[in-house]
Amino acid sequence: MKTFFFVSANTIRFLPFFVSEGVYVSMDGGLTWSGSDTCKGEYINFHGGDPSISIDKNGRFILTRLGRTPFVGLFVHYSNDSGKTWSFQNIINDHDLERSVLASDVSQSSPFYGRTYSVWVRFNPPYALYFSFSDDGGITWSQPRQINNPTQRCAGGDIAIGKNGEVYITWAVVSSISPFPSNLLDLQYQWMVGILGRLLRKLFK
């Protein structure tokens, strides 16, 4: 079985100013690497960095990133040739947001096999988490839906998928007192059939 890796990073040049997302690939288990400091999906000059990446059931590379004015929000590109070329941008949302997190369901026992999820925090009160998903390899995305209704600002967000299609989402709850540390971590379990799940427990304080 071939072991390959796909990683990304913020890439910034200050003079002249340019922001993008590095695309780096290893086809031999990490021994050698190739790639580019620029995700070449158009519009290249309006990329805003903060990439998140996933590989779906068909081996398609999917990358989300922020946009820059006039393209505000969360955008997605996909690649069918291991990152050599990338699709034109598609929009997932027009929110002012923190970095998105991606995960693809690659469990063949899951009823949502092949689905890719995106989760993010919206930078508007109450600073809640939202999610969207794609069932066609990142081409189209569901209408964003709010996950929680926090009384304190949320930050981060991460996602994991169980073998039967369960979706687990964690996020930090941020203190309102300077220097604004994260003072607890929440976990939500969801069975993604369009109905939000339930809060399992506060993981720690």
Image (spheres, rainbow, N blue to C red):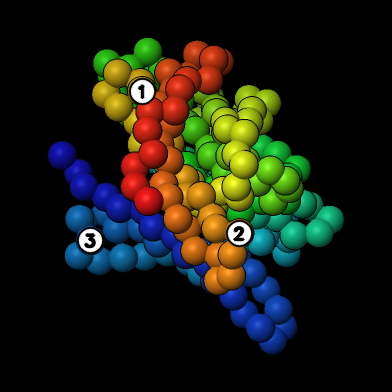
- Residue at 27 percent of width and 24 percent of height: 163
**Left or right of residue 73: residue 77:** left
Task: Please report contact status of discs 3 and 1: CB closer than 8 Å, yes or no.
Answer: no
- Circle 3: residue type: Gly
- Residue at 47 percent of width and 58 percent of height: 182
- Circle 2: residue type: Ser
Above or below — where is 93 with respect to 200?
A: below
Of helix, strand and loop, which one carries label 2?
loop
Q: Nearer the viewer, mark 3 or mark 2?
A: 2
Above or below — where is 161 with respect to 94?
A: above
Q: Quadrant of the N terminus?
A: top left
- Circle 1: residue type: Glu
Q: Quadrant of residue 183?
A: bottom left
Residue designated by label 3:
30
x, y percent for residue 189: 40, 26
Of helix, strand and loop, which one carries label 1?
strand
**Left or right of residue 69: residue 41:** left
**CA–CA distance between discs 2 and 1?**
32 Å
**CA–CA distance between discs 3 and 2?**
42 Å
Q: Quadrant of residue 87?
A: top right
> Would you say residue 65 is visible in this rendering?
no
Q: Earlier in the sequence, mark 3 or mark 2?
A: 3
Label annotation for residue 176: 2
Q: Earlier in the sequence, mark 2 or mark 1?
A: 1
Residue designated by label 1:
166
Q: Nearer the viewer, mark 3 or mark 1?
A: 1
x, y percent for residue 64: 56, 48
- Residue at 75 percent of width and 43 percent of height: 94
Residue reaching furthest to the left: 1
Mark 2 crowd level (few <14, some 14–19, many ≥20, 10 Å Cα): few
**CA–CA distance between discs 3 and 1?**
30 Å
Task: Please report contact status of discs 2 and 1: CB closer than 8 Å, yes or no.
Answer: no
